[in-house]
Image (cartoon, grey):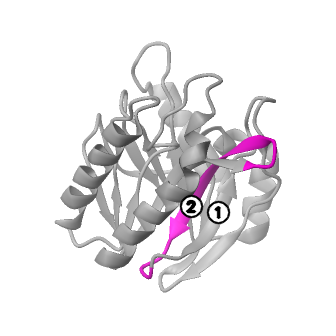
Amino acid sequence: MKVVLISMHVEDGNFETNWKEFKQRFKEALEYNPDILVFPEYCLTGFREWDFGGAKLYDEIVERVSTLAKNNAVYVIFGLLEPYKNCVYNSALLINREGEVILKHRKFQEPMKFCTGNTVKTAKTEFGKVAIIICGDLYNKRIAKWIRKKKPDFLFVPMEYSPESGKISEEDLKAMSERAKLLGVKTFIVNSYPPGGTWVFDESGNLLSQSKGDKLLIFEV
């Protein structure tokens, strides 16, 4: 299984600019013959408090990304805003090689203006069982219980994390490592740029590989 983690630049509220960036980074990743491409949290719309306008693009975004996945026979994981009745979920999808959505995760760890998820699901692939959580979910106690219950082989974490310092610190890396160890699963994390960064941890929380800024990270299991 070859995974490419893509820390793309995301411009809040500018779908067409983000779509051009998404396609360009997608094209770059294809040069490495990947099985799975992973993008950050709400990577095609960004999110500016409390502008939920990007949720209106949900169907169009799913259609466009599904077409890319199908045309290139790859899996794609990415985050987006999902409208639901009178509120919005911060969600992430896994689209398979046929362009079908086979897994959706709705973020638990969100302020009250969002709808929040209440379960973790998994999807079977030829590589094993996959789960997705989003950003702050990594530190959520209920999420930890679900992950230990579901026992995925691989956990993917789209993220949008911008610390006040503007840099990912050693303390941030230590926190990620500790959570990967607690969850007991090989964990792939991709953050939007800036500040960017991607990380892969093993089941014991050891950092296996990382990239800084908006550089691609290619990791083969």
Q: In which quarter of the image is residue 119?
A: bottom right
Badge 2 marks a residue whose secondary structure is strand
Per the image, the residue denoted by label 2 is 93
Q: Is residue 27 visible?
A: yes
Q: Where residue 33 appears, x then y in whole percent?
A: 23, 73
Tell me which segment is drawn in magenta: 84-98
Asked whether 221 or 62 is in front, the reply is: 62
Left or right of residue 152: residue 15: left
Helix, strand or loop at mark 1: strand
Mark 1 surroundings: few (<14), some (14-19) or many (≥20) residues within 10 A: many
Q: Which amino acid does label 1 sit on?
A: Lys
- Give residue 104's mark: 1
Residue 148 is left or right of residue 104, and the answer is right
Please name the residue shown 49% across and 13% down the image: 164
Left or right of 58, for residue 169: left
Residue visible at 46% across and 76% down? 99
Residue 49 x %, y %: 62, 22
> Is disc 2 in contact with disc 1, using a CB cutoff of under 8 Å?
yes
Residue lying at the far top in this picture: please name it. Answer: 165
**Image spot of residue 162 (x, y percent):** 48, 24
What amino acid type is highlighted by mark number 2? Leu
Find residue 193 and report its image quarter: top left
User: Against 220, is 80 above or below?
Assistant: above
